[in-house]
Amino acid sequence: MRNPARLTGLALVAVPVAVVTGLTQAPAASADHHSRAEAAIAAAEQHAGTTKFGDHQSLVATGTLVDPDGTAHVRLHRTYRGLEVVGGDLVVHTSRSDAWKGTSQTLASDLALATTPAVARTTAETRALVPSAVTRKIRGQRAEGAALVVDATAAQPRLAWRVLSSGVQSDGTPSRLASYVDARTGALIRTEQEIQTADGSGQSLYGGTVPLQLTLSGSTYQLKDATRGGTYTTDMGNAQDSQLCSLLGFGCKTGTLFTSPDNLFGNGTTSSRESAAVDAQYGTNMTWDFYKTTFGRNGIFGNGTGSYNRVHYGSGYNNAFWDGTKMTYGDGDGTNYGPLTSLDVAGHEMSHGVTENTAGLSYSGESGGLNESTSDIFGTMVEFFAGNASDPGDYLIGEQFDKKKHLGFRRMDNPAADGSSVNCWSSSAKNLDVHYSSGIGNHFFYLLSEGSGAKTLNGVAYNSPTCNGSTVTGIGRDAAARIWYRALTVYMTSSTNYSGARTATLNAARDLYGATSAQSSAVASAWSAVSVS
């Protein structure tokens, strides 16, 4: 049975330059960013055999991280004959003196193809709407435009039409579907769902009484936090968005900002519409603080800009989603699920934004599973970081609003327990729904953090198996999270698969702890334990 509440935007946003200081990041000078970016582009062009740079290509830097020793990691996006190369992004690593230290990328072959399509735009749009296992689940689907791209996500790059279509998914979640149609043959290559589905105080539904930073406007308090990028929370009044909003992000309903005559919001129950809003705002605050305190990241976008929350979306809506700018939460059906505003879901949804603005993992195949894993991993870490006695940290996802079992709809120690997710990698993993193939990354992270076998933590019993019969000793969740974050921000690219994630995390562990460290050995062991080599 598929989980009814599947946490799952797509926005290509430039990542601001940052300097890694120890295990944190802080803003760096713009001039240094430009000089290091220019050097990285030059290095990529000089090492064309490795980077696959060639005629008719251009590279643009979208973000730079600099380590304490001066090593720079510059993320580059690629075009070919003026067309975006999907899967052609790379990270160039250079020394303090701008000497070449290597690259992280997934582009497998040189680009040498014509860019005149044999299939017309209108034909591609029609093909994208042909009923399929994906499109049959979308109501009112209609094509909203198409653009030529080079699809380099497979071994052989090909010219494709990327067709965008809008609609509403079967559970009420907006649909923003990108369908890739071969511009030579008209065959559908793949589809990607780009809506990714979760000085006062407040009485929350799940976290008890929590502190809030409010904004006083005249004599009215607003549920808006100027200390965290101006993040705020609105009431959607159980309305839903239009198709235009679903596709383009324009004309979206913003909802009504929550306000109060005093500095107290909510009553801890659903009888007050403010209560779910308190959970959402608190979740935003804790997620912001987790990334800031742990990694020095200044908000989702890395530039100090806040996002916002919309609660009470739709009627009986069993989901939450991130759409590139904001989090949106349903109230649940009231029987199986309550409002989906729990702390780990807030961390999950906001972490989709972090992934978009770093590695940009595409939302299909194994990279889509890694995208979902990343959100589960950091959503879990937010819950542990908050240290809230009413919602103690655990490796269960969504247990707070699970009204019947209180076990959530995913668990990281044994993902297969939900009946759909997988514990172990196989060649068929790329064909699974990304929420189920994420089990491989979740299982790896749990094993790396806590180890295999039986364990009880914060009152929850775990018993994590391994796929190869091995015994894994954990290194602790904090070290595991630092390794995953560095792998995400420094080594992963949009098409990274599970084998590539193994390499990326081994590189990250080497950087942070040393190539012969216990942490590096544990990373290798944990990946082997989930059948990733």
Image (cartoon, rainbow, N blue to C red):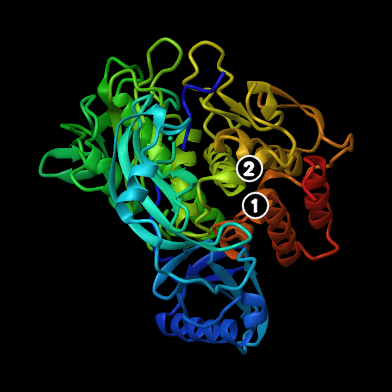
Q: Distance of mark 1 from mark 2, alpha carbons? A: 9 Å
Give percent across and percent down for residue 142. Answer: 28, 39
Residue furthest to the left in view is 218
Mark 1 and mark 2 residues within 8 Å of each other at the beta carbon: yes
Residue type (three-letter) at the residue carrying disc 1? Asn
Q: Position of residue 279 (x, y in %)?
A: 38, 31
For disc 2, the marked residue is 430
**Does residue 518 appear left or right of residue 50 in this picture?**
right
Q: What element carries label 2?
A: helix
Q: Can residue 13 be seen in this view?
A: yes
Vertical side of 29 occupied by 206: above or below: above
Residue at 64% x, 29% y is: 421
Q: Is residue 458 left or right of residue 158?
A: right
Residue at point 39% right, 54% down?
A: 162
* N-terminal label among 1 and 2: 2
Q: Pointer 1: what residue?
A: 497
- Pick the quarter of the image with the N terminus: top right
Q: Which label sits on residue 252?
A: none
Q: Is residue 242 above or below residue 217?
A: above
Q: Where is residue 311 in the image (x, y as percent from the top left)?
A: 30, 31
Give the residue at x 40% y 27%: 137
Residue 451, quarter of the rendered image: top right
Q: Which of 394 and 524 is in front in this view?
A: 524
**Location of residue 153 by image quarter:** bottom right
The amino acid type, in three-letter code, at marker 2 is Lys
Give the percent coordinates (x, y) of residue 230. 28, 51
